Image (cartoon, rainbow, N blue to C red):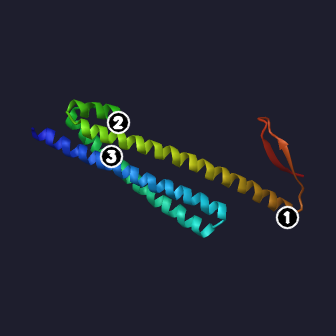
Amino acid sequence: MDNNQIELKFKTSSFKQLWFEFVEKHTELYEKTCEEYSHLLASELDELEQTVDEKQIIIQHINKLERSRNEVAAEMATLMKIEKPEKLNTMLNKLEEHKMDSEVNEIKKLNAVLLDIIEKIQEQNKKNQIFLNKAIISLNELRASFSGKENYKTYSPSGMTRSGLT
């Protein structure tokens, strides 16, 4: 094994570890997103604020991991003589050419888990946003009723209801 191959093996190990950390941090983010929804439902504003702050810290950590991943991917691309390692499959195919099948399989599995978690986070964020939108509409209606203005609904051109005041 030459130095180039040894260095590539080391970088691949780092790359795989980063993918594992991505899965861990995205799992934490998913849990915080679910927590956020629970706090919204229970109107626990102090806890909600803390959870949102914790989510931000996790997102910052994920951003650091992303920068590290880009650096390691660029170093691996240089070692494997790939011009632009923009797609994971390109990188994995080259690693297979370098006889790193077990590492490739582990990265593929971690990536599949990561994609699943990201999809769940997106779904939960949509639920959270729908809840917030409904709460804002209710608050606006409540505020309008306290101001003595009559609240009515009309339909927009798209067929959706919209609030109006007389």
Secondary structure at badge 1 equals: helix
Q: Which mark is residue 146?
A: 1
Amino acid bearing label 1: Phe
Q: Is residue 90 left or right of residue 42?
A: left
Mark 2 neighbour class, 10 Å CA radius: few under 14, some 14 to 19, many 20 or more: few
Residue positioned most to the bottom: 46
Check residue 88 in the rendering and tell me which mark sits there, or answer none. 2
Instruction: Give coordinates of residue 124: x percent, y percent.
Output: 57, 50
The answer to whether marks 3 and 1 mark residues whose Cβ atoms lie closer than 8 Å is: no
Image quadrant assignment for residue 61 = bottom left
Compared with 151, 70 (above or below) is: above
> In front: 67, or 49?
49
Among the 4 quarters of the image, the one containing residue 111: top left
Dot 1 alpha-carbon crowd within 10 angstroms: few under 14, some 14 to 19, many 20 or more:
few
Left or right: residue 39 versus residue 10 is right
Residue occupying image coordinates x 67% and y 53%: 131
User: Which of the numbered marks, if any, corresponds to residue 69?
Assistant: 3
The amino acid type of the residue labelled 3 equals Arg
Residue at the image point whose x is 57% and y is 46% from the top: 123
Alpha carbons under labels 2 and 3: distance apart: 11 Å
Tell me the number on the disc at residue 113.
Answer: none
**Mark 2–mark 3 contact, CB under 8 Å?**
no
Name the quadrant containing residue 135: bottom right
